[in-house]
Amino acid sequence: MAGRARSLVARQLLAASLGLIAFLGLTGFALDRAFTETATNSLRARLKSYASAYYAGGEISRSLEFQEPNVPPDPRFVQPGSGLYASATGPKIDWTSPSTLGRDLPRIGTLAAGQTRLDGPMDVVDKAGGPTERVYRFAMGIIWEDGSGKNKREIPFVFNVFENTAVLNEQISVFRLALWRYLGLAALLLLGVQMLALRWSLQPLRRVMRELSRVQRGQAEGMSGSHPRELAPLTESINAFIVSERENLDRYRNTVSDLAHSLKTPLAVLRSSLDNGVHETALREEVRNQVQRMSEIVSYQLSRGISTGHQLFAAPLEIEARAEGIVTSLEKVYAGKRVLCEFELDPGARFHGDQGDLMELLGNLLENAFKWAHQRVLLTAHSDAARPNRRPGLLLTVEDDGPGIPPDQVDRLLQRGVRGDERVQGHGIGLSIVQNIVRSYHGELNVDASKELGGARFSVRIPPGL
């Protein structure tokens, strides 16, 4: 099983820490090298100044002995073991400063006149057996000219100045201590700033997580729209997914409800036939017809999601025969009311669409009229005149002589699950199905009072097609 992935904060802090360590490490190394070179150059310049001062203030006697100046460049040159030493060495000269008492200084070969050299660290041995001393040496090649003419002498020698490494090492140590202390403080400060910057920059993500948690708990319907543009595609996708899932869930529920509602009439017809003691032959035929009808209803509802809608090349469907079949079934269901259904159908009126849509449209409108009518129901159908080269539309009207619908209740009754009278049996979805079908054909459903029968009038207009 894979381990739990690191959080974004941990990833960012790890990356920032590694980058910061690498940057500060390289910076510290570069500064350390620069200071070391600067301190070494300073040491070289200092020792060179000592050598130049000695050379300028000294003399070489006739016996080829180097005579140091009365006042040395630094008092440490006359203090034994002071850590600052000088010597003059050559084929004929061998001199050391008083500070070298008891110490054996390293020697160097000849150097050309004016040539300088810095060596070290190297060892200075204590003749008395004391600890070996580490020193830097600056050597300068010199040619001493004495006399003139035939008596002129050139005496080559090397003047050396030695200094204990402790001086340079202490300077470097002090610098390194201060350098890494300040770099460490800078690292802590930068990490703190990075953490604050991460908290601020990741705040929108935390907000998305809180909103998503609220959606999961059912406390919010979706993600808000006020997010940075980098997160906008994510939140929009989440909202689209939520809407899609809700629409699918509603579609599944509606399909089941529509299926149950559509099967209600065939089942009621079968129940009525059984209750009325219909002859066996007639009952068998009725069962066959209603089972066929229920099979068509199931097939229609299952395929409704892809077949419902305005079809460009749908075959025209004749209305009268289908309306008569529905009315015959309803007359059996509502036989006790003895409702009379009249037709006023234009022979040329046709429905251009799916047969299941037409059956649902007529079935729900006529069943609603039968349910509320006292004695009469009127179905009218007329063609909607079309322009040349366009198929005609359809004007379909169903009226009843029932109590009617108050104008202020129309919108409420067209909502899914709402019934006009809770005492009347029904599901309250028939008119919602009608409205959905009419909308899928870009049509209109109007509900008003019937001038002829006095009850409600449902008018459906399907516009002309291409």
Image: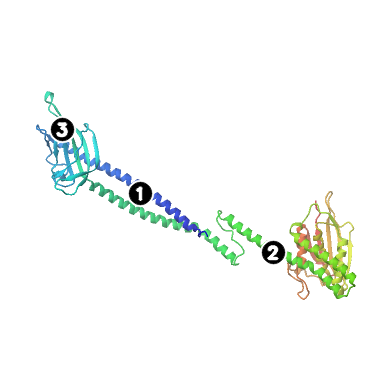
Earlier sequence position, callout 3 versus callout 1: 1
Amino acid at dot 2: Asp
Residue 155 pos. (x, y %): 15, 30
Q: Is residue 286 left or right of residue 260?
A: right
Crowding at mark 2 (Cα within 10 Å: few <14, some 14-19, many 20+) = few
Earlier sequence position, callout 3 versus callout 2: 3
Please tell me in which quadrant of the rendered image residue 250 appears.
bottom right
Q: Is residue 344 left or right of residue 199?
A: right
Marks 3 and 1, how far apart in space? 47 Å
SS for dot 2: helix
**Residue 371, relative to residue 350: is it above or below?**
below
Q: Of the numbered discs in the image, which one, if any, rests on residue 91? A: 3
Say which residue label 1 marks: 28
Name the residue at 89% across, 72% down: 280
Marks 1 and 2, how far apart in space? 66 Å
Crowding at mark 1 (Cα within 10 Å: few <14, some 14-19, many 20+) = some
Q: What colouring style does the render use?
A: rainbow
**Residue 90, relative to residue 362: is it above or below?**
above
Say which residue label 2 marks: 250
